Amino acid sequence: MATPPVFEEELDIGPPPSIDPEPAGGPAIWLMRVLSMLVIPAVAVLFFFSFEFLRDDSVSKVWQVLVAVLVGVGGVWALYWGMDRTISMFSEATAAAIRPFAFVGPAMVLLAFYLVYPAVNTTILSFQNNRSTEFVGFDNYQRIFTESQYLTSMRNSVLWVILVPAAAVIIGLAFATLADRLSPVAESVSKSLIFLPMAISLVGASVVWTFVYAFRPEGFGEQI
């Protein structure tokens, strides 16, 4: 049986799908990415320095915290909403290239400010004198690696970093094995022993902080 001919006017092809061109990876895209990362941190800084209310010692701290939380949370939500609306005005490809920087970028900027900047600044200060007025080179490091009190502190820190995680992993693995292979009654006892330190951890922490703040002036015993 012969196949009937298909005429061109019978085919409902329709217009070709529109393809959103890839955004140019030029300076304009990167400029918008950087600006979207800095909008929220910049507004947060301006908010802090603009509101004298938040830095007035005579005002109740409770009111300061309430205003900071309410205005801060509401303002950040409004900023993210406005940024998303603004980014949506661009083409789909351009918006997809900018939106991750707009939503993740502010957190990365704040994280870098609170973690990376202090680390870099501390490294720079380590090459200065005790008043940070002039550079002394490696004198501080020479003192740390030659005097006994600093060597003792470094040794204790290294032992703490190595032994405590190792002991925690070994003991935790042992308890997990016991809890998995014992009888139901013994399993309940072992689980109680596992969770018991969580109930008394506050007591241990309070004792440690008591030692931390137990300053002893000269002539009243040895410092802990």
Image (cartoon, rainbow, N blue to C red):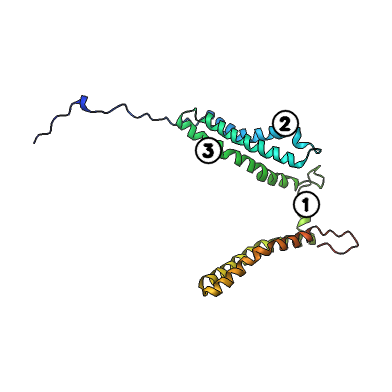
Query: Mark 1 to mark 3: distance in Å?
Result: 43 Å
Q: Which residue is mark 1?
A: 140
Task: Tell me the element at label 2.
Answer: helix
Residue type at tag 2: Ser
Q: Report the number of numbered marks.
A: 3
Local crowd at mark 1 within 10 Å, few (<14), some, or many (≥20)? some
Disc 2 vs disc 3: which is toward the camera? 2
* Residue at image point 70% right, 61% down: 202
Q: Of marks 1 and 2, which one's residue comes earlier in the chain?
A: 2
The foreground one among 125 and 34 is 34
Residue type at tag 3: Pro
Do residues under tags 2 and 3 come within 8 Å of each other at their CB atoms? no
Considering every residue shown, the one lying at the far top of the view is: 9
Q: Which residue is mark 2?
A: 50
Disc 1 vs disc 3: which is toward the camera? 3
Query: Mark 1 to mark 2: distance in Å?
Result: 40 Å
As drawn, the label of residue 10 is: none
x then y, percent, for residue 23:
46, 30
Residue 12 drawn above or below residue 151: above
Residue type at tag 1: Asn
Q: Is residue 15 left or right of residue 220?
A: left
Q: Which residue is mark 3?
A: 100
Quadrant including the N terminus: top left
The foreground one among 87 and 161 is 87
